[in-house]
């Protein structure tokens, strides 16, 4: 579906309070909107905070992870994209730009096995296309209140004083503040009484290489009483997600298109479920895509004028992991 078709389908299903799965790519040019009753588990598996179509499926015995090899792009190749972003940041065209890359990987697990063995809150498997195991919420809608939980800031939990270091780092603090302000403004387009309920709290994420700490905030707003009549309009008004684009959003999207050397596709898009009353959804990050016979992991991070190219390159690589 194109954008207008997707908006119409979501509005139609939500007006009828009919549960559905939605999947929207980064460019918002391609969507899949499927009634839950019609999702074929041989083709698509989803897990959204415990709501899943995979419960009770008989899978093979757990396969041991024996091979996970990263083949990141060369530093100089990353630096060319980084320098393009930094040029615009120093000109004042953007305050924060999310730069992403592709990393070929070798893994003895199939994408379907990765879906079942990962522990992330938001998981999606689309046969022969990709698997996602995302820790990041896009939006939740509960009884007329909309919530967003922007996630910005990552550090190796094994480092000494890791929590203190991430919370006191000036670059990370500024980056997070920018995203919180952007998301607050985005929610104000569709809701009233928008407020930051909780600012910069820590989540711990387990990976095959150890633990990571990630920093999030909680923002909420009140939807009007007729929100189920226009749910598709509300969702698309917030896209692309601020945490994976930057600020100001419109100009930063152009910078991303200039700097990146790959097409994001569904990576950094969103997916979620409507249960007949409420919405829960995640951002499509921590993303493995099948390109012909090669598995490719897409990852990245936010760049500000205070960023270091070496540390951003290492963060991009650090985010290439399996959440076991």
Image (spheres, rainbow, N blue to C red):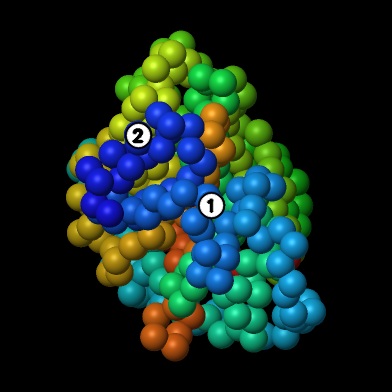
Task: Tell which of 224 and 92 is nearer to you.
Answer: 224
Viewed as shown, does residue 73 lie left or right of 110?
A: left
The residue sitting at 35% across, 34% down in the picture is 11
Residue 130 seen from this side: yes
Residue highlighted by disc 2: 11
Q: Is residue 299 above or below residue 182?
A: below
The residue sitting at 43% across, 13% down in the picture is 225
Q: At which x and y percent is residue 56?
A: 75, 62
Q: Are marks 1 and 2 in contact (CB under 8 Å)?
A: no
Q: Split into 4 quadrants, where in the image is the C terminus?
A: bottom right
Q: Split into 4 quadrants, where in the image is the N terminus?
A: bottom left
- Secondary element under disc 1, as helix, strand or loop, is helix
Q: CA distance from mark 1 to mark 2?
A: 18 Å
Residue 37 tag number: 1
Q: Is residue 239 above or below residue 45?
A: above
Q: Is residue 113 above or below residue 241?
A: below
Viewed as shown, does residue 89 lie left or right of 115?
A: left
The residue sitting at 24% across, 52% down in the picture is 2
């Amino acid at each position: 579906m194109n954008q207008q078709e997707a908006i119409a389908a979501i509005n139609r299903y939500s007006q009828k309070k009919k549960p559905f799965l939605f999947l929207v790519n980064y460019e918002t040019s391609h969507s899949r909107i499927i009634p839950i009753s019609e999702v074929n588990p041989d083709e698509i598996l989803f897990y959204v905070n415990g709501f899943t179509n995979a419960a009770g499926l008989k899978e093979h015995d757990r396969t041991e992870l024996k091979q996970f090899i990263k083949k990141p792009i060369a530093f100089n190749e990353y630096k060319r994209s980084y320098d393009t972003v930094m040029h615009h940041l120093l000109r004042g065209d953007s305050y924060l730009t999310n730069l992403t890359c592709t990393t070929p990987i070798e893994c003895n697990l199939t994408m379907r096995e990765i879906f079942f063995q990962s522990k992330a809150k938001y998981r999606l498997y689309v046969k022969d296309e990709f698997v996602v195991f995302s820790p990041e919420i896009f939006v939740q809608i509960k009884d007329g209140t909309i919530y967003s939980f922007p996630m910005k800031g990552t550090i190796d939990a094994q480092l000494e004083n890791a929590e203190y270091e991430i919370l006191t780092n000036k670059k990370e603090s500024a980056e997070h503040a920018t995203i919180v302000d952007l998301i607050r403004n985005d929610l104000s387009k569709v809701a009233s009484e928008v407020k930051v309920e909780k600012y910069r709290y820590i989540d711990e994420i387990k990976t095959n290489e150890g633990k990571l700490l990630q920093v999030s905030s909680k923002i909420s707003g009140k939807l009007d009483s007729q929100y189920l009549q226009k749910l598709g309009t509300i969702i698309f008004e917030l896209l692309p997600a601020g945490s994976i684009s930057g600020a100001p959003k419109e100009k930063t999207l152009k910078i991303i298109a200039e700097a990146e050397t790959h097409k994001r596709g569904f990576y950094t898009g969103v997916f979620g479920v409507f249960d007949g009353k409420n919405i829960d959804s995640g951002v499509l990050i921590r993303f493995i895509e099948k390109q012909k016979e090669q598995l490719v992991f897409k990852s990245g991070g936010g760049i500000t004028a205070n960023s270091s190219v070496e540390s951003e390159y290492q963060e991009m690589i650090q985010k290439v992991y399996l959440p076991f």
